[in-house]
Image (cartoon, helix red, strand yellow):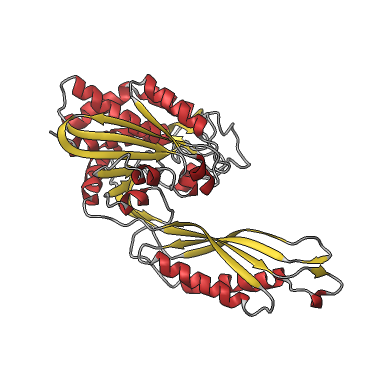
Amino acid sequence: MNDLQRAILREVESEFAAATAFLAELVKVPTDNPPGDCAAHGARAAELLTALGHPVEVHPVPADDLAAVQMISASNLIVRHAFGDGGPCIALNAHGDVVPPGLGWSVDPYGAVVRDDPQHGPVMYGRGVAVSKSDFATYTFALRALQRLVAAGALALRGRVELHFTYDEEVGGEIGPAWLLRHGLSRPDYALSAGFSYAVTTAHNGCLHLEVTVQGQQGHAAMPKSSRDALEAATGVLAALYASRAALATQHSATHGIDSPTLNIGLISGGINTNVVPDKVSFRLDRRIIPEESAEVAEAALRTLIADSAARYPGITVDIRRLMLAKPLVKLPGAETLTAALQKHGAAYFGTSIIEHGVPLYTDARHYTAAGIPTVLYGAGPRTLAEANGHGADECLRLNDLKRATTTVAAMLAELLAA
């Protein structure tokens, strides 16, 4: 560890109890999405940030924009801090919305309970503690460490750091990061999005959500020939979709950590009653798109497959509605600057190499790259989602990883903003 890395570690350690308490307060305010009623959490986060001395811009999302993504309330928060003149602007983005807790928890999912693990030290439990309320704390206290070092005359920096805290990652990010960029509220030179402690993520899959509605004509179950059975047709369409998985499995990404495209049908509804031939069936599908694929080509192929399958059933119509399209994250020129700095400093603090990889998930990071901003993902997340029970019961975060990720991000910022 060099002198700067040691100095940053001392600053992070001196405030680590405050960082842990900060994270606990964020976990205690529910932000389940759906239903997506997140304004109260934004207000609490703004209150906590203000108490730390950060002026906070609160940008409420208009009702029409909320309705478009089926959310109830959300505000986007921006904290801006300028060091010396010149230098780049680096945005740090984390999302506060989470999936609902579900069943099987051994603790209150909003209790921010801390248990001691004999192998890993203190571990905090709660929905969103790892994905990604943790990085509200990572990024806030990384910035604070640099502010304190600069104030003490131990460090000279130039450029700006912005914290972007948003609330719609679970529904695509269109009223969060994309909204901030679209409305000209920020235009950073680099962006860092919430991620994992032991790897820098430089690519990820895209995701397409479609809602398919198969419509026929209802009739009495005793005389089914006089009807048009929407469920029978939907079954045929579903069979064709499931059969298409075999071809998807033959495609492989060249990106480490990403394998093949996938297709999943996750929701279905329809029918009127047991003794009625169903007149309408709707289902929703999830198609993951690897970085080498074209999202537009993938969607067109699905639409053709669905329409052709439904056409085999006389009197049946089908409607296909796009719910969301998240394009894959690809590495832009300049991203290697972020990656190299995070790998170097992460190795010093974690005592192990920090790999570069891709993930099969989709994230808000793609909105920054879509705007031409080099972006990677790194934060206090776990080695794997399974390790942290991400999106599962007893989601948890090793607090020592939070500390080391905070120092890593602070050291990366110090390197890129060096005067």
Residue 60: percent from the left, percent from the top?
A: 45, 35
Say whether residue 297 is visible. yes
Q: Residue furthest left?
A: 419
The answer to whether 326 is drawn above or below residue 231 in the figure is above
Say which residue appears at 43% left-offset and 65% top-offset.
260
Quadrant holding the N terminus: top left
Residue 358: percent from the left, percent from the top?
A: 36, 55
Quadrant holding the C terminus: top left
Q: Is residue 383 found left or right of 234 in the rendered image?
A: left
Say which residue appears at 33% left-offset and 61% top-offset.
255
- Asked where in the image residue 235 lies, by quadrant, the reply is bottom right
Residue 328: percent from the left, percent from the top?
A: 38, 58
Say which residue appears at 47% left-offset and 42% top-offset.
388
Q: In front here: 326 or 341? A: 326
Say whether residue 69 is visible. no
Q: Is residue 416 found left or right of 206 in the rendered image?
A: left
Residue 211: percent from the left, percent from the top?
A: 57, 61
